[in-house]
Amino acid sequence: MTDASASDITTPPWHAALWARMAHAIASDRVAHGLLVCGPPGVGKRVFADRIVAALLCRNRNAEGDACGECAACRQRIAATHPDISRLVPEEAGKLIKVDQVRAFSQRLHLTPQYDSGRIGWIDPAEDLSPSAANSLLKTLEEPPPACHIVLVTDRVSALMPTVRSRCQLWRLAPPAPDAAREWLQTNGVDAQGLDADSLRTPFAALDRDAQDYAALVNGWDATLSDVIRNREDAASAADRLAKQPADLLTDWLYRRASALLAVALMEGGETHEPRALPDNLARVATRMDPHAFQPWCAQVAQAARLARSNADWQLVIESLLLDLKSRLKRRQSK
Ligand SMILES: [Zn+2]
């Protein structure tokens, strides 16, 4: 494989079915103008989006519908000098994408492309569009220049304005099955034998960082959550530590803990037939929970995830989540 974005890793097998659909759409020239590539962190969304861009620009695609890596357009793309690619990203990490940036971006997309493959716009992360920036983008998404494609990448499709979402075609990547993830990681030089289910669900995160580190992070967060619930640590000091963790991984973990806690709470007698998705001490908490009192907390976790990239005080958001969880558990105990 000569594609730059995937030069040192093999194609993830869990992308294959979605790629087959995309390759077919590209080959039959029926690709939507707005393509929203979404899915949880660590599944390889940017690799997939890069693959789309490469294929759209290539003059000589191969049998799988992938870019050849050798034509003039591919060489320019690989050298990051392709004249028809415009990128819209936050000016600083963690900041929102501004309306002025969107205006300049839309103007660039309307310039005559150098190649007849048309212009490509790349927006990443799409949930970082400020509300006014998102509004300003709508017209371009609705009436894009001919042959123009805009690829948006997001971890949290629910955080996008519905008006942006509805103007894009959704390409959703799901996490791989554990065996597929393990095999792929091994092929790419990561010792995956000892990896837990969390790490296998986010193979690109495992590839990016030392896999042991990620497992240790999750263990630490689980211990913190359990300590807060059992009054061994106060919510403020726990929030202080959690707020310094990588926000996308932390919110993904919170999502999964909230839904696993709810699943256990909903089970009669607390018996689960599923493989344990929770550490033992959290599972014990969940068996005593009132699912009706707990359910609103899951919605709050989703709401908090949206605030992670906003200007909200992230530490305060986490602290109020923890306090709210405790008060919901207390209400149950005092019944
Ligand atoms: Zn090519």
Image (cartoon, rainbow, N blue to C red):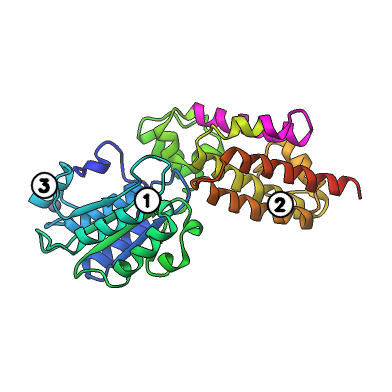
Residue 10 placement (x, y as % from top left) = 31, 41
Looking at the rendered image, the quarter that the N terminus falls into is top left
Instruction: Please give left or right for residue 44 compared with residue 122 in the image.
Output: right
Front position in the image: 26 or 83: 83
Residue 297 percent location from the top left of the image: 70, 52
Tell me which secondary structure the magenta stretch mostly adopts: helix
The span picked out in magenta is 212-237
Inter-mark Cα distance, 1 to 3: 34 Å
Residue tagged 2: 262
How far from the left and from the top, in percent, is residue 188? Answer: 35, 34
Question: Is residue 79 in view from this perspective?
Answer: yes
* Magenta stretch: includes residue 226: yes
Q: Give the image quarter of residue 185.
A: top left
Q: Is residue 144 left or right of residue 258?
A: left
In three-dimensional space, the C-alpha distance between marks 2 and 3, rounded to whole angstroms, equals: 51 Å
Q: In this rendering, which labeled residue sits more in front, label 1 or label 3?
A: 1
Badge 2 amino acid:
Leu
Q: Which residue is mark 1?
A: 97
Which of marks 3 and 1 precedes in the sequence? Answer: 3
Mark 2 vs mark 3: which is more N-terminal? 3
Tag 2 secondary structure:
helix
Q: Is residue 164 above or below residue 221?
A: below
How crowded pointer 1 is (Cα within 10 Å; few <14, some 14-19, many 20+) is rated as: many
Question: Circle 3 sits in a helix, a strand or a loop, which is it?
Answer: loop
Return the mark for residue 320: none
Q: Residue at x 37, y 58 (%)?
A: 133
What residue did someone put label 3 on? 70
Residue 48 locus on image (x, y percent): 33, 51
| Residue occupying image coordinates x 77% and y 42% | 326
